[in-house]
Amino acid sequence: MVNDSKKTPERAAFPPYPWVWLAVTATVILLDWHSKARVSEALELYRPVEVFSWLNITLAHNYGAAFSILSDAGGWQRWFFTVLASVVSIVLVVWLLRLPRREWLTGLGLALILGGALGNLVDRIQLGYVVDFIDVHFRGWHYPAFNVADSAITCGVALLLIDIFLQSWRKEKKG
């Protein structure tokens, strides 16, 4: 006869609580805010400082969205992107809080995206523009300047795409 009263405890899922994802989000916001503050204090607007032959630190103000889309739209875009980022952030917080603990890759991706979105949202509300400063270039071609928040968003999206690929691969493997 088997004694069912002493079941072996299940291995705890990682992370233990949703607050871990909120801590990742807060870390991204703080790193983004700190880096933007230091660059804004130390550099003149649009005056590049070479770090490597392919990388400059250049203080830039982006009044638009990614790649400066709508940067010269007359001012309405500030409030449009503020509302959009606010709504997306609320959706991401709810998603993170409801996410099953076993979906850690999704959680990490969402936390990075949320941190980046909120980091840029703070700029947009306080300043009316987003501070960008990372300037990657090659043979006269410059990628649009970006910041820590943008990097976090990009990494978060990459993690979500990897997670989708892995989930699809697991389903194919089972079926």
Image (cartoon, rainbow, N blue to C red):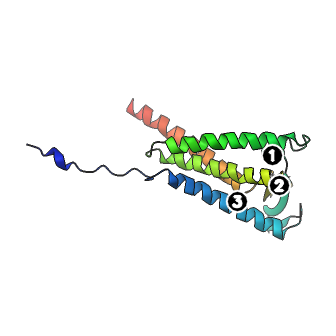
Counting from the top left corner in percent of width and height, residue 112 is at 61, 51
Q: Disc 1 versus disc 2: distance between alpha carbons?
A: 18 Å
Q: Earlier in the sequence, mark 1 or mark 2?
A: 1
Residue 2 visible in image? yes
Q: Residues within 10 Å of mark 2 (few under 14, many from 20)?
A: few
Q: Residues within 10 Å of mark 3 (few under 14, many from 20)?
A: many
Q: Earlier in the sequence, mark 2 or mark 3?
A: 3
Q: Residue at x 58, y 50 (%)?
A: 111
Counting from the top left corner in percent of width and height, residue 36 is at 76, 62
Q: Amino acid at mark 2?
A: Leu
> In the picture provided, is 101 more to the left or to the right than 117?
left
User: Which of the numbered marks, if any, corresponds to residue 169?
Assistant: none
Viewer-side residue, 13 vs 78: 78
Residue 69 visible in image? no
Q: Residue at x 16, y 44 (%)?
A: 4
* Residue wearing tag 3: 32
Viewer-side residue, 35 vs 139: 35
